[in-house]
Amino acid sequence: MTETIQQPLLSINNLCVEFRTQQGVTQAVDDLSFEIKHGQTVGLVGESGSGKSVTALSILRLIQEPPGCIPAGQIVFEGQDLLQLPEKQLRKIRGNDISMVFQEPMTSLNPVFRVGYQIAEVLRLHKKLSKKKAWQRATELLDLVGIPDPQKRVRFYPHELSGGQKQRVMIAMAIACEPKLLICDEPTTALDVTIQKQVLALLQRLQQELSMSMLFITHDLGVIADLADEVVVMYRSRKVEQATTAEIFSHAKHPYSQGLLACRPKLHDNPKRLLTVADFMSESGEARQPSAEQLQPQIKSDKSHNPVLLEVNNLKTYFPIRSGLFGRVKAHVKAVDDVSFTVRKGETLGLVGESGCGKTTLGRTILNLQPASSGQVLFDGVDVFAQTAANMRQLRSRMQIIFQDPFATLNPRMTIGHAIMEPLSIHHAAVGKQQNWQRVAELIEQVGLNPDILNRYPHEFSGGQRQRIAIARALAVNPEFIVCDESVSALDVSVQAQVLNLLLDLQEQHGLTYIFISHDLSVVNFIADRVGVMNQGKIVELNTAEEIYRNPQKPYTQKLLDAIPKGF
Amino acid sequence: MLWLILTLTFFLLRAAPGGPFDQERELPPEVEQLVAQKYQLDQPLHQQYANYLKSVLSGDLGPSFQYADHSVNQLIGLSLPVSLQIGFCALIFSLFCGLLLGIIAASYADRWPDLVAMIVAVIGISTPNFVIARLLILWLAVHWQWLPVAGWQGGDWPYLVLPVIALSFPYIAAIARLVRGALLEVLQQPFVRTAQAKGLTRTEVVFKHALQPALLPVVSYLGPAAVGLMTGSVVIEQIFGIPGMGRYFVQGALNRDYTLVLGVVLVMGLMMLLFNLLVDLLYRYLDPRVKGT
Amino acid sequence: MIKLRLGLLLLSCLVLAVVIGPLFAQFDTETIYWDFMASAPDETYWFGTDVMGRDLYIRTLKGGQVSLLVGLLATVVSVVLGVVYGMVAGMAGGRIDAAMMRLVDVFYALPFLFLVILLLVFFGQHIWLLFTAIGCYLWLDMARIVRGQTLVLKEQAFVESARSIGQSTRLIVLKHILPNLIGVVVVYATLIVPQVIMIESFLSFLGLGIQEPMTSWGSLVNEGASYMELAPWSLWFPALFLSLTLVGFNLLGDGLRDRWDPQMQNQPTRKSQTQ
């Protein structure tokens, strides 16, 4: 590659962004500088709250002021400082020279206008096209971003399209005026892996066809591996490293980048426990190296001779679709459609599939939180669906669930202590209050938190901490079996690694049996002994994790595996 | 639905003690009987109910007990157009002012125009209607003599202005608050940011992209508001001496004029159904997501 | 935040005035001072006298006690009715819920206010009847809001989590649903109080409100409004107190709502049809 000395398209110099609220000033971006050259793709990587999205919004001055405020820095685009530009001129750049694709395709399109109108609006604004021509161009753009039957879809409202299609519409809107710079703020985070792959491929194709520059913001290093020329890593509002993509992946310099790379489970050769950022960097920011012990490879023991704990036979869960005046049942959604499998003691069964495949409903049905339409679940030989209410409550102390959203699983008006106490006061009331509180303190230590926090309320904790609290609550009554329903999906990768390690530790200590539900194949591969692949309510393939990943039998499994970003 | 309301009202009315012809002075029993016979009050209750329903179905709301020689149909026929006229003007007026105030308040959130608009709104909600009405009369009609004090004169416009303003005041305030709240919430939505990123001006963003979704709560408020406005207001009618429908409501209740009250309730119910239908249609037009379900 | 503080400040001043103010009064509510009919405020009669020659200072404050009392008691009635009904409907769900909400729709359409009038006409204008009747009239909004909230809460993961540890329905309601409803209920309760006071003043306009010898802001304002030109102060003082109270409660309610439950700001609530 020949480096010609030319003006970069965009250069950010010493940018600072603050949010000033009554609680005080929060530094969102601190002294950030980097450049984007013509035709180059720069990846901006960091965890939630690292300031990466704020940076993206600042470029077009889209942060809300107040409370947002840019006290210092320059954002130079083609020789003009965007921060000094009057509003009127800035508007000519927005959507025309620089445009954005946002994270939430569901809410980023206006629900009350047709998609064609929304695309045409940009064209009429900046290219001064007539109404008819703009609509025509909108149809062409929909075709370009790969939406089937664009003549028809151009007249659709956003809610009539799928999530992936909405994101394609967003992209069509963003490239309508053939911008010089496209800013993508986590464009694929809300999408399924297979869709993510398609959207990434689309972005890559468009970037080459339109020879535009791209700023790609993501929390997932894997996503940008194939896409970016250069990567900027942000940590706690600051840039900690900037290098070419190849350099970052082969030998990252900053300990934070090293940790970020290591904490994501890979498809092969994982360590016994995942490494976390803390293994590379102390709390104060000093670099350190993980010990050899931590790098021991993971070996999954053979559990195929353990006794059977859970047996699921021909389970079906249908949701009726009612319509008409009297709510007659017209059809059924077959969320779980004739599923059978067994889980052995001490084993982890992973369930993977895309959103809407029925994996969550399956987990809830097994625990009898969702009534089954037909079929049988035997837990340790006991028929779960044939219990009286009182017996069922007894049985619940042996089987538990950990939910996805750490923000919703804890009652906001209950202290942490009482939340963990609740299951104890139901099942172990006889033990006495004093001893139960002691047990609560033990539990909170087991999940790696300080017992001092017991009097506090959930809103004071981060997502990872809340998920630990939820685990402590589930563990309180010494269950044998836990369903983890997307339990790490909402967490940042480094926190995700910590929680996964915790789950493995607890399994080892207490001989727990897990059903681990996730959309993330690499996470499931890391934690599960056997994996079931679900599609449209059915388990299409069920085998040991190794076999599934090395030697997939079904085309659907193959498709899922292909969609995993190949960054590693 | 309408039938349910009518039935409930019918029996509640009858369950309440007292009758339409109870007066200070005892009537001679034979007169009382004659009167009762004339209005079929001597028959068993279920019989009366059946008779009433039958006549309502044929479009006859029965004779008024209090206003002799007038049928309820006549009374309502005379007063409803008056109430409708005032109500309709007030509805348009309060929508216009309410929207304006609400949009101004939301676009200048937490700055002085917002504060002023919201103070006006809070005062509007917090001042009894009859005080506002009388103040308007005192200043605009008595002191400055711009407008007539009261009266109707067949709905001539100078006679309309004051009652319409007085009637609208609390509704303006309510709509302004609704619009402000809804607009502020919509302005937080990601799609507003998308619109801004396209390069639209602030005004275009507010009026084109944010206003339509923000109107939804206002539309659902409009149904009951319209009914309230158009079925007449006792207070306004009494103060301005307007021959509208509201007074029958209270007088009918005070005098136990069964058929009159039932007639008024029926008209109100009909209008409620009509406006709910209109609101539904409007809602569907404004929010395409509703169509699918 | 400003709203909340302003509302609180305003209301505490008013309550203080109404409770402590009468202690400094030199006259009582009923005595008629024949020589001072409709006299303007001066150092003896701080708020002036009304057309019948009664001291307005003490009447305004005593009337305030009655108005606030009616407001609070009627609110309690409507909150209790609304919360119980709404929560039962929300928890039951399905057809029971649909039927219960249908009933609420019917009640909305009923001329409730006029039943209140009927009740008052026949049973006389006892103060307890007044607030019970008004309370029964205003519970519908509360029931709807509580039911909606309950439906949302019921689907929350923490409620399912409580079920998954084997918690009984009764305790789920008490420990998980009810505590999370309190915010909304308090917010809407503060917004019901001004509605009650407004309805009371409307009933006073019809001559059905609080009866002599008791008085209330509503009836004072109404009296004052009738003699506005003769004795404007007899309107100004009660009206000022009445409006300030309503402003105070509205500010407090709005402030609490902004603070506690930002997503509920747009619940369209029916304005009471008192006008």
Image: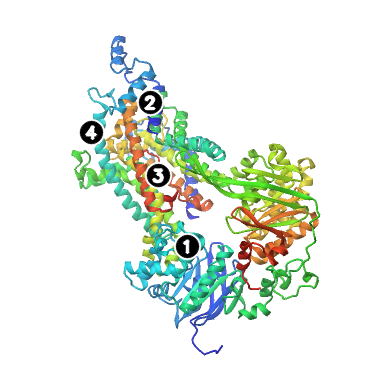
Colour scheme of the rendered structure: rainbow
The part of the image, by quadrant, that contains residue A46 is bottom right
Q: Mark 1 lies on which chain?
A: A
How far apart marks 2 and 1 lie (CA) works out to: 53 Å
Vertical placement of residue A325 versus A1, above or below: above
Q: Nearer the viewer, mark 1 or mark 3?
A: 1
Marked residue nearer the N-terminal end (2 or 4): 2
Can residue B45 be seen in this snapshot? yes
Q: Do the residues labelled 4 and 1 touch (CB within 8 Å)?
A: no
Kindly identify the amino acid type of the residue bearing the numbered disc 3: Ser
Residue highlighted by disc 2: B10
Residue highlighted by disc 4: B78
Q: Disc number at residue A108?
A: 1
Q: Position of residue C261 (x, y in %)?
A: 52, 51
How far apart marks 4 and 1 lie (CA) works out to: 53 Å
How far apart marks 2 and 3 lie (CA) works out to: 37 Å
Q: Mark 4 lies on which chain?
A: B
For the C terminus of chain A, which image quadrant? bottom right
Who is closer to the viewer here, B96 or B45?
B45
Who is closer to the viewer here, C36 or A390?
A390
